[in-house]
Amino acid sequence: MPEPGSGVPRRLLTGWGRTAPTAADVVTAERVDDIDDALATAGRRGTIARGLGRSYGDAAQNAGGSVLDATQLDRVLDVDFERGVLRVEAGVSLDALMRMLLPRGWFVPVSPGTRFVTVGGALAADIHGKNHHVEGSFANHVQSATLHTPKGIQQISPDRDPELFWATAGGMGLTGIVSEVTMRLLPVETVFMRVDTERARNLDDVMERMRTGDADYRYSGAWIDCMARGAALGRSVLFRGDHATLDELPPRKKAHARRFKPHTLLTAPWMPDGLALNRFTVTAFNEVFFRAAPREERGRIQAIAPFVHPLDWVSGWNRVYGSRGFVQYQYVVPEEADDTVRRSLELLSDARCASFFAVLKRFGAGNPGLLSFPTPGWTLALDIPTAVHGLAPLLDRLDELVAEAGGRVYLAKDARLRPELLPVMYPKLEELREVRKRIDPTGVLQSDLARRLRLA
């Protein structure tokens, strides 16, 4: 691993998704008992669980140790369609759940920009979506979970060993391996969304629209043009909506109101570095995207998948960044720290940072998770090509701005944060370490992220 602040390990940049963890012994859990065997036989470098590999950094990497592939533990154990309660093994994906639930009038309560994450990973990262200001993060909807630790199997919930539950929610797999989750579902009438779209001329404009209007929507997020400068800094396209009811559908859509068969539009090829995304191609893309969006459009009915899961439109979309790859960077700062968002966009724009995927959202209240990322305020997520000149000091400067504002970066996406900033961003870090001493006194649960950030 490189020294803190020197950049990002190449092995974390060229693969995303089902790529195998590097330099680790991969163990596949075919039965729940295999989890306990993996914990009992872990070597000096320990073990960590891995789902579908959608974490951008090294949270599920464990060089020199072992990685437990839990994706075969994917059974639906029980579902109560009357009450909207589901019990599943932790390796089941949100994609599989949606295909089962949506035809029956239910939806997962929280989903990130991709369906291809496991339930266990969703709890370990305490994932969030465009509906955080209404629904909170994933752990808010978990009733209970079965956690395998080096000290034995624990049944945890917000009421049963809440200390361990809230250490596990967002704990990046460092408190144990989840085998089973019971969660509440969200009732819906159709597989469609009712969406309002608006163009905002700059950052002040989009922030004001979100402050005054987000309460009227379940889902809200704004695409930001990071190449815009001057008076247009932060110009945006704001997308907000809610699940469409049956009465809101046009007649031709009512016949398949609950038919959920999402598909990708195309598969991205590997791009030669000379043709990969750069500031010229991204500037052109951003201009076209902004101008093509309606100035104001109300009540458009569209399928749920492209609205909630934009990352699943194009298979292998990460390839367009070429062999040098990209960094995913996401932070949250308090709502009164809007100047921090402005300053970060100025730094990115001045560096001609070619990010065509930049999303601004507002978080609502956080939860008691010790390492849970969401806190009230503004969150900005960015894809940044590693070809950007001076990327390492740029990201270090962004980290400092975020920390000074009382914010934090998202550990599920991090690959290069300096460890001394972690306790500043996550003030409950010592509480997590105390929980780990109780349930993992010999340090069996380890990862590259834990070692890099001195968590283990």
Image: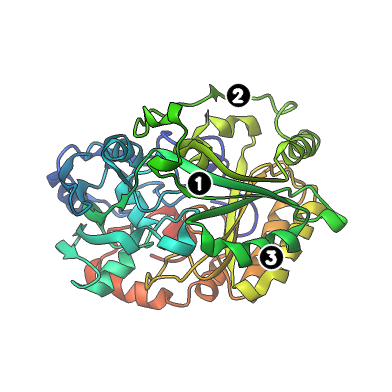
Mark 2 to mark 3 CA distance (whole Å): 40 Å
Mark positioned earlier in the residue sequence (2 or 1): 1
Q: Give how far across and how far down residue 362 sits, in percent.
A: 56, 63
Neighbourhood count class around disc 1 (C-alpha, 10 Å): few under 14, some 14–19, many 20 upward:
many
Mark 2 to mark 1 CA distance (whole Å): 18 Å
How many discs mark residues in the rendered view? 3
Q: Give how far across and how far down residue 141 sits, in percent.
A: 31, 60
Return the residue at label 2: 270
Q: Secondary structure at mark 2?
A: loop
The foreground one among 23 and 324 is: 324
Residue type, label 3: Glu
Residue type, label 2: Trp
Q: Give how far across and how far down residue 405 sits, in percent.
A: 64, 75
Residue type, label 1: Tyr
Check if mark 2's residue and mark 1's residue have beta carbons within 8 Å.
no
- Position of 339 compared to 156: left or right? right
Q: Is residue 133 above or below residue 6?
A: below
Check if mark 1's residue and mark 3's residue have beta carbons within 8 Å.
no
Q: Give how far across and how far down residue 232 sits, in percent.
A: 82, 54
Q: Is residue 408 above or below residue 80?
A: below
Mark positioned earlier in the residue sequence (2 or 3): 3
Return the residue at label 3: 208
Neighbourhood count class around disc 3 (C-alpha, 10 Å): few under 14, some 14–19, many 20 upward:
few
In this view of the protein, can residue 53 be seen by the observer?
no
Mark 1 to mark 3 CA distance (whole Å): 31 Å
Please name the residue shown 41% across and 49% down the image.
111
Return the residue at label 1: 56
The foreground one among 135 and 59 is: 135
Between marks 1 and 3 in the image, the one whose residue lies nearer the viewer: 3
